[in-house]
């Protein structure tokens, strides 16, 4: 019988699939591979809607987890966040409250919840670090999601203070990789633009990038991020969050992203920017100093272009089963 049962909520999404990939492909017993006595459960929403406390309880009673990596969330890119602020706030608040309270009630030994660099204040000195979460209001474009997520840090401290729980959190920057949500409108920039560029090439239609192309982001490959969650599960026991990011000097502009996508997809036409679309936050650079001081400076991140090529290849090869959302029928030329 397994002595450690790790329940990954949101286990079927971008990050959950990457954790599963790393656990199944790294050598058994290695730093990021499966350890003897471990059982990993990757739960989907079809096994229980975590907005509902009764379904949450049932899921926990079914698997009896000793550890939880809590990824489940209503997730979306800038444009979806701007449209559904209340839904992002409510759904994520309910999910987080149910997962943490059920973990406490059922005696889970450790919970790692996933936040996002959106939780940080909009007006703050850069780089972002783990001490700055609550120093001001988040950017207006995603304040529903950001407020729900930052409250997890408050809850973690309160569970520790009142009950001594070992609950903590991770703060990843923008993530991408295989199994992302490649919806044309509601996804994040990399999967959204990969899909748009793929269709532009296939249908001979224009490739249009939203906004000015000037904003900067730090992107982390989902398979690198997966290793960081596995490290945190095994080697980090403190309530304070850890930022999971590439270096501060590795910000990439949206134009650079679009150029890399054009190359990866092999699109030969010109592309344009739709400057009527929002840019969102201009930049939100975060430091990974704390992470590297703990995991070791020798942790290797996959170079951006290599990770993007792997993602593009996965997307093209798996177009029929990828999450592509609604795709309009191309207009006849
Ligand atoms: P994703 O691909 O959209 O996956 C979301 C996962 O959550 C899916 O497994 C989904 O299950 C599950 N889920 C959604 N609503 C649920 C509900 N009501 N009950 C139970 N499960 C539910 O998202 P992701 O990008 O992997 O995100 C994982 C975590 O990383 C999230 O906490 C997100 O906030 C955080 N994060 C993401 C990014 C990014 O750029 N993607 C950046 C920073 C932080 P089904 O698919 O089965 O419905
Ligand atoms: P966030 O702004 O960091 O929460 O994440 P996104 O991935 O949604 O967007 C990052 C940036 O990409 C913003 O400046 C958008 O204006 C820009 N962008 C350009 N084209 C797209 C697109 O097709 N989808 C999304 N989501 N963003 C896009």
Image: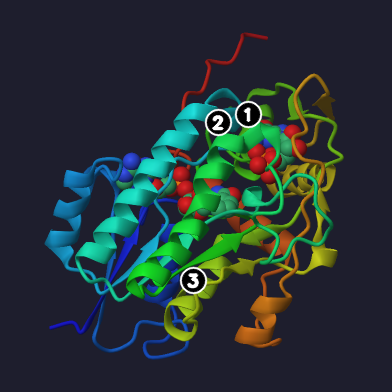
Residue ranking furthest to the top: 332
**Residue marked by disc 3:** 229
* Crowd band around label 2 with a 10 angstrom C-alpha radius: few (<14), some (14–19), many (20+): some
Q: In the depicted view, which residue is nearer to us: 315 or 89?
A: 89
In the image, the residue with mark 1 has its CB under 8 Å from the nearest atom of ligand 2: yes
> Which labelled disc corresponds to residue 186?
2
The vertical placement of 28 against 230, above or below, is: below
Picture quarter containing residue 331? top right
Q: In the depicted view, which residue is nearer to us: 171 or 312?
A: 171
Q: How is the image coloured?
A: rainbow
Residue 106: x and y in percent read 19, 66
* Crowd band around label 1 with a 10 angstrom C-alpha radius: few (<14), some (14–19), many (20+): many
Q: Please name which of the two marks, 2 or 1, marks the residue nearer to the observer.
A: 1
Helix, strand, or loop for circle 3?
Answer: helix
Question: In whole angstroms, how far apart are the C-alphas of marks 2 and 1?
Answer: 6 Å
Q: Earlier in the sequence, mark 2 or mark 1?
A: 1
Quadrant where the C terminus is found in the figure: top right
- Asked whether disc 2 touches disc 1, contact meaning CB atoms under 8 Å apart, the reply is yes
User: In this rendering, would 147 be left or right of 308?
Assistant: left
Helix, strand, or loop for circle 1?
Answer: helix
Question: In whole angstroms, how far apart are the C-alphas of marks 2 and 3?
Answer: 26 Å
**Residue marked by disc 1:** 79
- Asked whether disc 2 touches disc 3, contact meaning CB atoms under 8 Å apart, the reply is no
- Residue 135 can be seen, yes or no: yes
The vertical placement of 17 against 207, above or below, is: below
Helix, strand, or loop for circle 2?
Answer: loop
């Amino acid at each position: 019988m397994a002595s450690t049962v790790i329940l990954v909520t949101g286990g079927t999404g971008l990050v959950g699939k990457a954790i599963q990939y790393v656990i199944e492909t790294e050598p058994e017993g290695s730093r990021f591979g499966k350890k003897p006595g471990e059982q990993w459960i990757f739960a989907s929403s079809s096994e229980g809607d975590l907005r509902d406390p009764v379904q949450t309880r049932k899921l926990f009673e079914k698997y009896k987890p000793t550890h939880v990596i809590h990824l489940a969330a209503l997730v979306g890119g800038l444009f979806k966040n701007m449209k559904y602020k209340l839904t992002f706030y409510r759904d994520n608040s309910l999910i987080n409250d149910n997962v943490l309270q059920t973990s406490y009630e059922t005696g889970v030994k450790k919970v790692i919840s996933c936040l996002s660099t959106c939780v940080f204040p909009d007006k703050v000195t850069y780089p972002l670090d783990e001490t700055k979460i609550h120093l001001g209001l988040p950017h207006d474009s995603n304040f529903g999601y950001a407020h729900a997520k930052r409250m997890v840090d408050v809850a973690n401290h309160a569970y520790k203070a009142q009950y001594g729980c070992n609950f903590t959190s991770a703060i990843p920057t923008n993530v991408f990789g295989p199994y992302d949500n490649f919806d044309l409108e509601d996804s994040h920039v990399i999967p959204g633009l990969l899909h748009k560029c793929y269709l532009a090439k296939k249908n001979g239609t224009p490739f249009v990038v939203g906004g000015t192309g000037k904003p900067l982001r730090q992107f982390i490959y989902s398979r690198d991020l997966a290793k960081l969650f596995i490290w945190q599960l095994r080697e980090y026991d403190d309530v304070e969050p850890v930022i999971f990011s590439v270096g501060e000097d590795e910000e990439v502009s949206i134009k650079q992203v679009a150029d890399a996508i054009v190359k990866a997809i092999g699109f030969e036409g010109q592309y344009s920017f739709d400057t009527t679309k929002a840019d969102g936050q201009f930049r939100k650079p975060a430091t990974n100093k704390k992470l590297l001081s703990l995991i070791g400076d020798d942790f290797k991140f996959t170079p951006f272009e290599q990770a993007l090529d792997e993602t593009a290849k996965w997307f093209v090869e798996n177009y029929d089963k990828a999450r592509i959302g609604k795709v309009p029928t191309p207009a006849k030329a």
